[in-house]
Every structure is written in C-alpha cells, then in structure tokens.
Image (spheres, grey):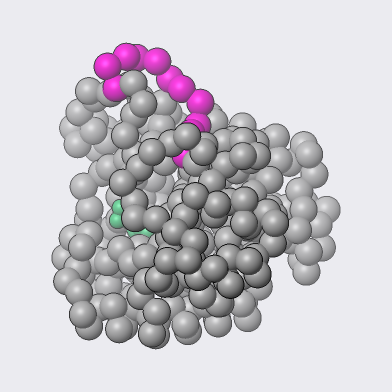
Amino acid sequence: MQQTMTATAVPPEEKSQALTPDEVKMAAEAVRMNGYVVFESVLPREQIAELHREFLRVFEAYVARTDPNRGENRYQMHLPFVPPFIDPAVIANPLALAVIEELVGKDCVCHYFASDTPLPGSDYQKVHSDIQLLFPETTLSLPAYSVVLNIPLVDFTEENGPLEIWPGGTHLMPGGVDMQRLAPTMHSERALLPAGSLLIRDMRMWHRGTPNRSQAPRPNLALIYSRPWLKTNYPPIGIPTETYESLSERARHLFRFENIGGPVVNAV
Ligand SMILES: O=C(O)CCC(=O)C(=O)O
C-alpha cells in the first residue's frame, strides 16, 4: 500500500509506544489527504497469536448461533469487552491514538468494538462507506469526525479476502454520488497487511470486503473513534463496572459514554 509508514527511530519492542510529533502530523495528513494510513506489524506476533486464538473461540460460538450478517459467509461480530481483547495495545494503542487524536480531537470517544470476518466462500461486498455524511445536501468537504482502527489478526493476502479501499478523495466526496458506477472507474487498493498492523481510515472512505478464497477465516478487528458529539446507531458497548474501573484513565475517558455496568456481549 502506498500510505504505509513505519515508526522510524523507535526500537521494535517500543513500536507501539511512540511516534515523533512530525510522524504524527505526517500520518494525520495522510489520512486527511488519502483517507488512510498504515503502520505495519505493530502488535507483537505473540500477542496477535493470543488474540487470534481467543477470537476464534468466541467467533466459532457466534457462527454456530447466528446467520451471516454482512453477505454470504461473512460476519460482523461485536467483541466481548474482556481480556485479551481489551489489552491497552488494542483499545488505547498509543501509536494509533496519537494519530486519531490529531484527527478527531483528544476528547474523542471509542464507541464500537467489533470485528469483520469473511469465511471461505464469501464474495465481493458492494462498495460502501461506513458512516452517513453530516451534510449530504452540500458539496462541502468536512474534516474527519470518525475514524476506524483495523487490526488484522492474520496476514491479509490476495487469497484470503483483503479489504479493498478507494483512497485519494472518496472520504471527501459530497452526497448524491453514484458510488457503484463510479468506483470501478477509480483507483483502488487491496490492503495486504501483515497481522498486527494498524490501519487507520476515515469512516467515509469507500471500501468493500473481497472474496476469501483461502481455507481459513480472515478476522479484522474494528474499533471506531469519533468526536464526542457524533450520534450513531451502534449498540453501546457493555462494560462491567469493575472492568471499567480497572482501565487506564485514558481508556476510561475513551469509553465513558458506553454501557458501564452493562452485560458483556458474545462472551464464551
Ligand atoms: O472485510 C473487512 O474487514 C471489512 C468489511 C466491511 O467493510 C463491512 O462488512 O462493512
């Protein structure tokens, strides 16, 4: 992918800790201009292996009791707000947050904690954006108000259904554009990402899931961070009170509008 950045001058073991102020600015500019930025292989392999293992346990139980909800053989699943998913490197990743705060402000909230998984046999999704435009009746391009952080739990390859994105301005398109007719005429990219990478993208950027032709599920964690006034229809995240109180101050601030004291979903 073109907008791949590395946390230069940061030793691998501290990769998730820091970016220089200049790197934060550059990464935020990349999202503003192109709709996304990638930091490759930030989470350590061992952590990804544990997340993947636990994910599959939760996911298999989910698949056994629900129908595909994002097209054939393709599932969106809310994550249970429990370890290892709520590790600080996932919910309040310092590298991702530095860029996210630059884009949607330090007072932002995290209001979506979920995953997207195409299974073998899945097909192309329709090209779509993940959020409504604030003023679809105008041609105004507004700054970012909501961004999604994707963390692949396996390497995304040509075979296993990588996310396809339309960078270079689709996040700034006005309302009323015929996305399905226009998208095939525009440049798109497949997000071929190593497991544990961080993909930060403007929620408005056009994208779609592609067919998984491998033998295994292709899980992608998805956390949405937005300006605190944004209203969406996502169910509030259920967070037991003791879990909430055990979080860092930063994480508590991020999840402050969620269902504190509410039930954990999809736990097994
Ligand atoms: O394949 C993915 O990770 C994302 C799929 C997607 O965009 C969706 O289900 O809305």
Closest to the observer, 239 or 187? 239
Asked if residue 172 can be seen in this view, the reply is: yes
Asked if residue 166 can be seen in this view, the reply is: no
Closest to the observer, 182 or 129? 129
The verdict on residue 74 being magenta is no
Decide if residue 82 is on the left or right side of residue 39: left
Residue occupying the point 49% across, 50% down: 257
Closest to the observer, 86 or 14? 86
Residue occupying the point 57% across, 71% down: 243
* Ligand number 1: quarter of image: bottom left
Residue occupying the point 24% across, 25% down: 177
Could you tell me residue 230's position as x and y percent? Answer: 43, 36
Residue occupying the point 38% across, 45% down: 165
Closest to the observer, 215 or 235? 235
Q: Magenta span: helix, strand or loop, mainly?
A: loop
Decide if residue 164 is on the left or right side of residue 82: left
Q: In the figure, 164 relative to 28: above or below?
A: below
Could you tell me residue 171's position as x and y percent? Answer: 41, 32
Query: Which quarter of the figure has residue 2?
Result: top right
Query: Which quarter of the figure has residue 178?
Result: top left
Please state, as top left, top right, bottom left or bottom right, where the C terminus lies in the image. Answer: bottom left
Q: How many numbered marks are there?
A: 0
Q: In the figure, 65 relative to 86: above or below?
A: below
The magenta-colored residue range is 136-146
Could you tell me residue 23's position as x and y percent? Answer: 73, 41
Could you tell me residue 139's position as x and y percent? Answer: 34, 14
